[in-house]
Amino acid sequence: MAVPSSTYTLVMKSLAVALVLTIMTSFPHDAVAASGGAMGGGFSSRGGSRSSYSSRSRDHYWTRSSMNYNYVYREYRGGCCGYRQNYTPPRQNGMQEKYMEGFLYASVAIGVIFVLALIVLTYFDKIGPKTSVVKLQVALKGTACSLQRDLNHIALKADTTTQEGYKYVLEESAKALLRHSEFWLLSYLSENIRSDEHQAERLFYDLSFQERSKFDEETLVNVDNHQEQKSTLEIVSTSASPFIVVNLLVATARQLNLSPIHSVSDLKDILKQLGGLPKSEILAAHVLWTPQDENDYLSPERLLQDYPNLMDLKSKLD
């Protein structure tokens, strides 16, 4: 007997929920800490090169208010009233005619220039330089403890005040992730295009703030020359963390047009592209990871809650 499609869908959803609950209950829940690490910097070295637009005064516009378009004169005529008024436009002299003709030509020229300017600006906005803001998230098995040690080492060594430092943070973090590809489980990629660098900067730091606010506490920081290292939060459970999440946030001076991630091979290509960017194109780079301490614990609940866009890679291994 055939099973109705609605019943089949309900059964599949129930199995999926049961599977998630099984995974969530298979790990200890006595540790709720989620320490975080953050490193990188950006935009400060290019602050002096940004374009600024200043408005110009238009005090030189002038008007001619003394022109009379109707001339009134009184003519004496015989009659009961003795006077009557005639309204006759005066004959313009040569100077006034030349002025009017020049005014019309100037108005037409200004209109043409305005239309051409709109066309040029619209065309430039479509083909002009673009700025990319990329967010790449990778979730790994918690047994990849050496990755945490690698990221900690990079953060302690990096100079986060120069583009060379941004390049170092991004390249070394990408290489560290590539060395741990056998631990990859989930990933997410987004690329936002902006035509204005100020908008890209605002978006970049908004994304960074959103991701950093997910940590219970930042226990290792080296961002924009601000360095801080704290003792890891007290951890009740000594079990190995079931998950590690690494965020790569990158702002570039050109549009990257990154391909979507459908497989582990795609993720490797994306990491190679980001890690291989020349320093002159890197406007900003932040690398964020949690847990920062290899003895800390990131629960399945926190993974689902804080990183809902992650996509499964387990069934797409090469």
Image (cartoon, rainbow, N blue to C red):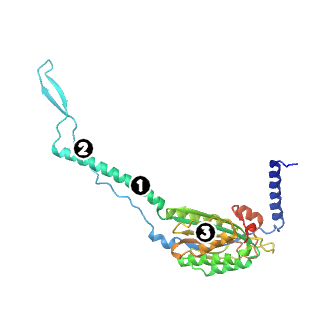
Q: Sequence-wise, which precedes: disc 3 or disc 2?
A: 2
Q: CA distance from mark 2 to mark 1?
A: 35 Å
Is any part of residue 44 visible from this angle? Answer: yes
Question: Which residue is drawn at the image coordinates 79% and 69% (left, top)?
Answer: 31
> Along the horizontal axis of the image, is 264 left or right of 41?
right
Tell me which amino acid carries mark 3.
Answer: Leu
Q: Nearer the viewer, mark 3 or mark 2?
A: 3
Q: How far across and down, in percent of the image, does residue 197 sit?
A: 50, 65
Crowding around mark 1 (Cα neighbors within 10 Å: few <14, some 14 to 19, many 20+) is: few
Q: Report which residue position mark 3 lands on.
A: 249
Tell me which amino acid carries mark 2.
Answer: Ser
Q: Quadrant of residue 266?
A: bottom right
Q: Report which residue position mark 2 lands on.
A: 65
Q: Is residue 29 above or below residue 73?
A: below
Dot 2 lies on which element?
A: loop
Question: Which residue is drawn at the image coordinates 33% and 56% (left, top)?
Answer: 57
